[in-house]
């Protein structure tokens, strides 16, 4: 007898059963997926669908901040699975933001037993696979233990989401090690915003790339195709970029749900009141919530800067907080796990204590920074020295993919002489096989040899990905578009860089 047939937990209450029926209207009518999801599928949603459609696989975990489309992605996957022929009664969605579905210990197992017996009408290990979607799973008490037990008991294809990604990350590491595959859902990229809400703008563009494809040189061909756009097309796209640069990638800012006059208030409320004010303190022992906010503000104010922890600690103490370096380090970790900031470590990774090797820090979404400070300098007219860190923050949003690590690099020309010239590269993307691709951001009208000296030095000292041609380095520019075949360096305008991925 399989474990799910052996009894155990009591049946769900009639009210719980009614809530489950309301959450899963496709049990009554396979055509009824409610709320009806939008037609645009993010690439991450398409990838999740392909993996879930396989007969077996790991537990899929979706991490991401609030309001980036995780629940919408579930409804899209349900719709697509049914369209592919999956029986609608083999799919169950349980949302743990509803208190009634999490109020008693063992409620997950109880609901799944009821689903198998009364909805699916056969055990989970018989016939076609069942699909179990657990939304806001972090709100379930001891969720990782419950999921581990349920996963052992009920063979199924599983997908978990959590707004508070810090908990999903922590619980997954502790109890589900080796059994999960994690997908990060950041705010929408510029290309995703256009594909979702301005599809006419991207009809003539080459297909988007995964960032890993940049190593193969596909970005060179993409840039060539984008450089042939007509001037009026580029102008229209540049105007869209100005809007994205200011507001960032939270989808409700582009869907029309948030009025133009309230976009900044919406972002401040979403991040400060919800994530910083509630999610993270609910999950971790935050003794000083105001210090957590201050640290996030420090990163937002100095986004894309190399910030030693002792410097952040000193700024916090100067502002009247009781801060020490270990606490600052912990709070930075929580912010990074919540996908509110990104930490880029030095390349190559040092064996020294991480706190002693400063990280380069950016906010994950530039719009949040602009909402806090109520604006940003103009992309078209402002001083390049003011724009540089903001454009770097914009560029980092697409430098991500499975199997890639992203660093920064800073080194003396003569490593044995600390007084020798210092070279820097903004981002170094590293593959699992150790191959690296350096990226420098130079958003200015004129780029001189000195501007790319650090990039050329890195390529010379750390080897080429393609010794006989191909792409060895990227310079993200304002307007310059050129490929140097001899060096393997691609100069690509910011607009084309963001549209490529």
Image (cartoon, rainbow, N blue to C red):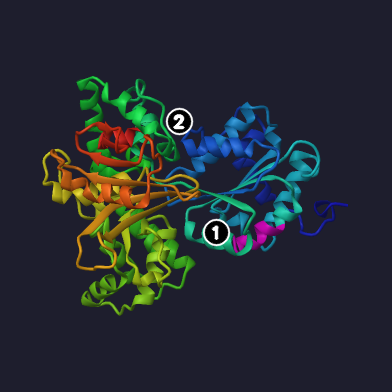
Query: Is there any visible trace of residue 367 in the rendered image?
Result: no
- Would you name the residue on which mark 2 appears? 40
Q: Is residue 144 magenta?
A: yes
Query: Which residues are the magenta region?
Result: 140-149
Q: Which part of the image, by quadrant, shows the C terminus?
A: top left
Q: Is residue 322 left or right of residue 27?
A: left
Image position, residue 10 (x, y; %): 77, 58
**What secondary structure is marked by label 2?**
loop
Pinpoint residue 365: horizontal percent, then vertical percent.
33, 49
Classified by dominant secondary structure, the portion drawn in magenta counts as helix
Dot 1 corresponds to which residue?
A: 139
What's the CA distance linking mark 1 and mark 2? 28 Å
| In the image, residue 434 lies in the stretch drawn in magenta | no
Residue 473 visible here: yes
Q: Sequence order check: which comes first, mark 1 or mark 2? A: 2
x, y percent for residue 437: 37, 45
Judging from the image, what secondary structure is the residue with disc 1 in?
A: helix
Q: Name the residue rendered at 29%, 35% in the picture.
A: 486
Please state the horizontal and vertical placement of residue 136, each as a whole percent of the image: 54, 53
Instruction: Report the side of 191 relative to 114 (left or right).
Output: left
Is 207 situated left or right of 108 in this image? left
């Amino acid at each position: 007898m399989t474990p799910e047939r052996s009894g155990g937990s009591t049946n769900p209450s009639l009210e719980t059963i009614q809530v489950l029926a309301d959450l899963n209207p496709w049990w009554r009518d396979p055509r009824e997926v409610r709320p009806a999801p939008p037609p645009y599928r993010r690439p991450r949603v398409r990838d999740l669908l392909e993996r879930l459609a396989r007969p077996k696989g790991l537990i899929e975990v979706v991490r991401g901040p609030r309001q980036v489309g995780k629940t919408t992605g579930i409804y899209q996957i349900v719709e697509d699975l049914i369209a592919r022929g999956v029986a609608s009664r083999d799919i169950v969605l349980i949302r743990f933001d509803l208190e009634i579905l999490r109020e008693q210990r063992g409620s997950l197992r109880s609901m799944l037993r009821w689903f198998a017996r009364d909805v699916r009408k056969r055990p989970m290990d018989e016939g076609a696979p069942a699909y179990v979607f657990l939304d806001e799973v972090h709100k379930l008490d001891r969720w990782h233990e419950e999921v581990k037990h349920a996963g052992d008991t009920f063979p199924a294809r599983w997908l978990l989401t959590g707004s508070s990604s810090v908990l999903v990350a922590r619980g997954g590491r502790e109890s589900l090690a080796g059994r999960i595959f994690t997908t990060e859902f950041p705010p929408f990229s510029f290309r995703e915003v256009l594909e979702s809400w301005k599809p006419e703008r991207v009809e003539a563009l080459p297909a988007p790339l995964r960032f890993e494809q940049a190593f193969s040189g596909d970005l060179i061909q993409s840039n060539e195709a984008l450089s042939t756009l007509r001037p009026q097309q580029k102008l229209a796209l540049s105007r869209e970029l100005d809007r994205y640069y200011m507001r960032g990638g939270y989808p409700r800012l582009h869907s029309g749900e948030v009025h133009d006059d309230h976009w900044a208030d919406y972002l401040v409320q979403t991040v400060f009141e919800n994530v910083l004010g509630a999610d993270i303190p609910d999950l971790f022992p935050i003794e000083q919530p105001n210090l957590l906010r201050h640290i996030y503000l420090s990163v937002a104010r100095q986004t894309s800067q190399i910030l030693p922890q002792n410097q952040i600690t000193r700024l916090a103490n100067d502002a009247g907080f009781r801060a020490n370096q270990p606490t600052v380090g912990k709070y930075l970790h929580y912010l990074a796990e919540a996908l509110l900031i990104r930490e880029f470590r030095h390349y190559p990774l040092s064996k020294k204590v991480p706190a002693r090797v400063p990280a380069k820090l950016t906010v994950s979404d530039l719009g949040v920074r602009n909402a806090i400070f109520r604006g940003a300098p103009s992309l078209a007219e402002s001083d390049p020295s003011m724009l540089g860190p903001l454009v770097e923050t914009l560029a980092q949003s697409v430098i991500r993919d499975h199997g890639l690590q992203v660093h920064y690099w800073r080194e003396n020309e003569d490593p044995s002489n600390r007084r020798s010239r210092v070279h820097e590269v903004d981002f170094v993307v590293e593959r699992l096989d150790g191959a690296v691709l350096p990226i420098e951001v130079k958003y200015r009208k004129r780029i001189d040899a000195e501007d790319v000296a650090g990039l050329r030095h890195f390529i010379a000292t750390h080897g080429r990905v393609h010794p006989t041609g191909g792409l060895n380095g990227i310079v993200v520019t304002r307007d310059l578009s050129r490929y140097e075949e001899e060096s393997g360096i691609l100069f690509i305008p910011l607009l084309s860089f963001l549209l490529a991925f």
